[in-house]
Amino acid sequence: MNTWIFQGNPKRFNVDDYLLENERVWWSIRQEHLAKYIELNDEVFIWRSDGFTKGSGGVVARAQIISLPQKYTNDEDSLEYWYEDVSGNEYLAVELKVLEEDVAEGIRRTELIENEELSNMMILRQKQNTNYLLSENHAEELRELWCHQILSKSKGKEKRFKLNENLKKEYQLYILPKLKPCDRAREYNFYSDELKAKVIFEHLINGKMHRWMDMNILGIPAEKNKGFDSANILYYLGMKANYRGLFQGKEMNDLITILSSKGLEYVEVVRLLEILNDRELEGNIDLDIEAELLEEGRGIEGDVKYYYGKRYERSAKNRKLAIKKHGLDCIVCGFNFEEVYGERGKDFIEVHHINPLSTLEEAIKVNPETDLVPLCANCHRIVHRRKDNILSVQVLSEIFNEKK
């Protein structure tokens, strides 16, 4: 795969609106001698020249080539973006799929000139061309800069990125910095999986420095702390400074989803993060069960012998497996506690035994996948409201859907 820069002049053409309003765009190939090197799925960075505002030039979008070079004439829709009459003009062009755009900020020319790796790019030395083929080193460095621009500070970015507002549907589009693993196996294996996962999480999402992680996660006293131990964990995995804070603002599940989509390179990182995620879920479930017992006045050591299946729904193991299988949305009404209550509602949902049981004094074997389902507090209460007529989930769903 090749990586290109395609330039557009905002004095002649409304570059910003063209990118904002269209998922697919056409771009001219003025340097026709390069056409033979263009392949399907090549990566393209769109460069907006300074135009009327000095210092505004630079990379404003990333795209993917979805057609080979061909003769093209502007249609009526694309003519509207031109400030001059180009109707009837035929020229060589390719069709692009816009992956991300940031016309508001982008990566400015002035920033790239100061970048040691990118300051000698051809477009910075010879700015009059339309098409530039990047070297592998330039492509990798520019991709890392753009990737960090897109994924960090996401709360502000998602509002501007028209094509990627629903980030969960666009994970596959993101190209992460190349992993550069180091041989630190002995140092890496010294710590438990859970501690290593905490280091990864703090590095990727909260952007913590090595010394902070050595002290607050790995428990190394300040007088002996040089930041080496957390650095060794990250360097073994290949996650160096260009990964710090890369996923700022993301949740653990988002992080796992993104990295899982990136293939075998991230298998070990995903494995560790899933361990940490499970520990957090188990901890939250234990706290929920403890709170329920206290609310009933039974104390921590109390036991509920029967409560319409609560004894078995309350098993931390069963509840965890049921949530992992069915998720945290109410199976009847779709209510999600975290979406409404934020951090206070994270990982919370009540779990209901599907079969209407009036007593569970005799132990039974519960299958979390087939016997337990997540219900919000309202739906769960309605199911059990009449102890002599406990509703099935199916009946409650029919009632709910009839009233919608």
Image (cartoon, grey):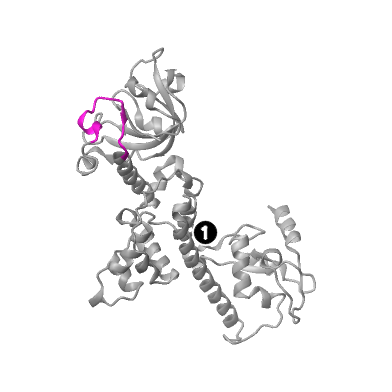
Residue drawn at the location 42% of the way across and 25% of the way down? 94
Residue drawn at the location 31% of the way across and 73% of the way down? 215
Q: Nearer the viewer, residue 150 or 400?
A: 150
Residue 93, quarter of picture: top left
Residue 357 appears in the figure:
yes
235 left or right of 255 in image:
left
**Residue 348, horizontal then vertical, whole percent:** 55, 67
| Residue type marked 1 | Glu
The question of residue 124 being in magenta is answered with yes
In the rendered view, tell whether residue 239 sits above or below residue 161: below
| Residue under numbered circle 1 | 339
Within-10-Å neighbours for mark 1: few <14, some 14–19, many 20+: few
212 left or right of 88 in image:
left
**Residue 295, horizontal then vertical, whole percent:** 58, 80
Residue 53 appears in the figure:
no
The question of residue 254 being in magenta is answered with no
Q: Nearer the viewer, residue 341 or 256?
A: 256
Q: Quadrant of the image for the N terminus?
A: top left
265 left or right of 361 in image:
left
In the rendered view, tell whether residue 156 sits above or below residue 55: below
Residue 288, quarter of picture: bottom right
* Outermost residue to the top: 88
Magenta-highlighted residues = 121-136
**Residue 155, horizontal then vertical, whole percent:** 40, 52
Residue drawn at the location 43% of the way across and 56% of the way down? 250
Badge 1 element: helix
In the rendered view, tell whether residue 109 sits above or below residue 327: above
In the rendered view, tell whether residue 97 sits above or below residue 157: above
* Outermost residue to the right: 388
